[in-house]
Image (tube, rainbow, N blue to C red):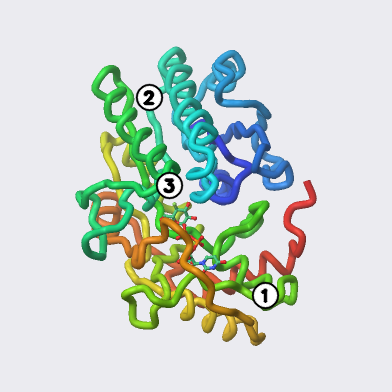
Amino acid sequence: MRILVTGGAGYIGSVVTEHLLGAKHDVVVVDNLSTGHRGAVDPRVAFREGDLLDGGFLEPALDGVDAVCHFAAFSQVAESVADPIKYYRNNVSGAISLLAAMRAKGVKYFLFSSSAAVYGEPDSTPIPEDAPARPLNAYGNTKLGIERLLADCSAAWELRSLALRYFNAAGAGERCGEDHRPETHLIPLVLDVAMGRRDELVVYGNDYPTPDGTCVRDYIHVKDLATAHLVGLEKLVAGHAGVLNLGNGTGFSVLEVIRAAERVTKRTVHYRIGERRPGDPAVLVASSAEAERVLGWKRFHPGIEEIIRDAFAWKKRHPDGYES
Ligand code: UFG
């Protein structure tokens, strides 16, 4: 298939692109490089630098395209709370513009990069897809809003969409990895401390109702996310649509991640306990039973140490991130 990947210069989009190319798909990457990196774009793809809000740019990029994987979005929770307009404009308006262009060009299949942030503070874990969606921040609201937009568009014309709600993506692909500026995610920050690139990690609170008091998250290898996209595309074309969680099904606390990183790197991770970060739920762990059932999806890299090892290997190869 010919697949348009928006946000293909970003972390998850670039790793999914690696896998699409590996499966012999023909890939067009659209990215405005506002947070993505030119160096993350595989030389084998057709790269179109531009903005989703520019419909005149998008429509030609959709020529001959069978399906769209939509990753392009701002994704920093705290920033979304401080500047919701920025998030709604980029994430929601970007999706509207993309869907309008797809409709104009007759492109029917849409794989959407959604988030566990749609659940907010869950009543219980592991979280199934039919748990109440009550986002705690503007970022989660934009993801949920786009899911609803997709459902409405699917009812109005022959669009078919699958929204994949990722839990905590981590690790690296063969070529591509995680390079956010600024970095806010736990595993790359822990590795920066282990590598001596930061003095210490601030653990955001140790008074949560969890076994060691620090927040528990479900870390899923970005390569396992990528394989879910490959099967997700097949299922979309075969007639499946809807919403699926993608996680590991096992939670690790912040302190457990630090210990695992110390084992992997054989270095000490200095940390201190700080204040809670506003908007952090205590525990977010997915039930991915539905994704396993519907997609026949299996995780090949479920271990936290393997996830951290791959992230560490990438960081050692790219200590300052991508060069461009
Ligand atoms: N954490 C720290 N110190 C840090 C960074 C993170 O203690 O310096 C903690 C956080 O409080 C949290 C855990 O480490 O408990 C993981 O934090 P991340 O920032 O790595 O990830 P989040 O769980 O906050 O967010 C991720 C994605 C979001 C998505 C969210 C779904 O990055 O895009 O999962 O809830 F919205």
Measuring from the top left, give residue 157's x and y in whole percent.
Answer: 29, 17
Give, as a three-letter code, the residue at label 2.
Answer: Lys
Measuring from the top left, give residue 256's x and y in whole percent.
Answer: 46, 80
Q: Nearer the viewer, residue 186 or 237?
A: 186
Residues at discs 1 and 3 in contact (Cβ within 8 Å): no
SS category of the residue bearing label 1: helix
Label 1 or label 3, whichever comes before in sequence order: 1
Give, as a three-letter code, the residue at label 1.
Answer: Val
SS category of the residue bearing label 2: loop
Q: Residue at x 61, y 65 (%)?
A: 188
Q: Nearer the viewer, residue 7 or 210?
A: 210
Q: Residue furthest front?
A: 275
Q: Quadrant of residue 253?
A: bottom left
User: On the rendered structure, is 72 left or right of 250?
Assistant: right
Q: Dot 2, crowdedness within 10 Å: few (<14), some or many (≥20)? A: many
Give, as a three-letter code, the residue at label 3.
Answer: His
| Residue 4 vertical position relative to residue 141 in the rendered view, above or below | above
User: On the rendered structure, is 1 left or right of 57?
Assistant: left
| Residue 249 vertical position relative to residue 50 in the rendered view, above or below | below
Q: CA distance from mark 2 to mark 3?
A: 16 Å
Label 1 or label 2, whichever comes before in sequence order: 2
SS category of the residue bearing label 3: helix
Q: CA distance from mark 1 to mark 3?
A: 32 Å
User: On the rendered structure, is 168 left or right of 173?
Assistant: left
Q: CA distance from mark 1 to mark 2?
A: 45 Å
Q: Dot 3, crowdedness within 10 Å: few (<14), some or many (≥20)? A: many
Q: Dot 1, crowdedness within 10 Å: few (<14), some or many (≥20)? A: some
Question: Which mark, by number, is residue 108?
Answer: 2
Q: Which residue is mark 3?
A: 229
| Residue 193 vertical position relative to residue 80 in the rendered view, above or below | below
Q: Which residue is mark 1?
A: 193
